[in-house]
Amino acid sequence: DKDGMKKQTLVTALIAAGMIAAAGGLAVCGGAQAQVSSEGGPVMVGGDSMHMDELAHTQTLVGRVEVIQDNARLRADKVVITRQAGANGRGFGEVVTIVATGNVYYVTPESTMKGDQAVYTKATDDMVLTGDVILTQNQNVTTGTRLVYNLTQKTTTFDAGTGRVKAIIYPDKK
């Protein structure tokens, strides 16, 4: 019967993904995966271990985690991807959030962002880094405690809580 085949296919896919993760490999995820690049496309995730919770609609990766899409890369000690429910209220649908903690790096062709935590929210297409945040663009360096980067608009907003945002900016050469 069709439902039995669908369940068997899902179980096989989950076992395969778990085996890839356990082996320290990278798993490639389809279009419903996170947007870490404004360009879209398939996403590759990898870490030392991965736990998938179908009922909670989460994927948790721990240890040298990388989330790569097109020309963007998110690295951290731990990443939790939360999704909407899939078909029939179970499984994995569209990404809702990605939370990265510990030694967070978000790298695009234009910049490198470093922080203690990053939260990507698909609804706003914002990546928010907090903690000891450093933004590097070519030779330019900006520091603060909170950075909001919009992937679609490619805009950055920085603040420093009770401190100050600091920047060293080198003019472009003519």
Image (cartoon, grey):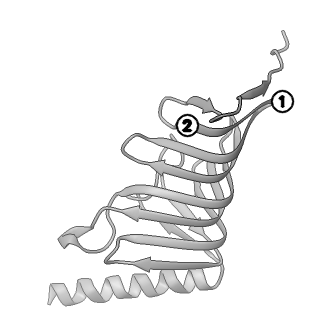
| Relative horizontal placement of residue 84, taking residue 71 as reference (left or right) | left
Q: Position of residue 44 (x, y in %)?
A: 56, 63
| Relative horizontal placement of residue 155, taking residue 109 as reference (left or right) | left
Where is mark 1, residue-wise?
A: 139
What is the residue that sits farthest to the top in this orientation? Answer: 174
Q: Position of residue 45 (x, y in %)?
A: 56, 66
| Relative horizontal placement of residue 103, taking residue 138 as reference (left or right) | left
Please tell me whether residue 137 is drawn above or below residue 75 in the rendered image.
above
Please tell me whether residue 126 is drawn above or below residue 22 in the rendered image.
above
Q: Position of residue 125 (x, y in %)?
A: 44, 41
Q: Residue at x 76, y 28 (%)?
A: 166
Q: Which kind of residue does numbered mark 1 sit on?
A: Gln
* Cα separation between marks 2 and 1: 20 Å
* Circle nearer the viewer, 2 or 1: 2
What is the residue that sits farthest to the front in this orientation? Answer: 162
Q: Are marks 2 and 1 in contact (CB under 8 Å)?
A: no
Few, some or many residues within 10 Å of mark 2 (<14, 14–19, 20+): some
Q: Which kind of residue does numbered mark 2 sit on?
A: Val
From this viewpoint, is residue 71 visible? no
| Relative horizontal placement of residue 8, taking residue 126 as reference (left or right) | left
Q: Residue at x 46, y 71 (%)?
A: 59
Q: Position of residue 154 (x, y in %)?
A: 55, 30
Where is mark 2, residue-wise?
A: 148
Counting residues from the start of the chain, the first of labels 2 and 1 encountered is 1
Q: Residue at x 55, y 37 (%)?
A: 148
Dividing the picture into quarters, in which one does residue 5 lie?
Answer: bottom left
Few, some or many residues within 10 Å of mark 1 (<14, 14–19, 20+): few
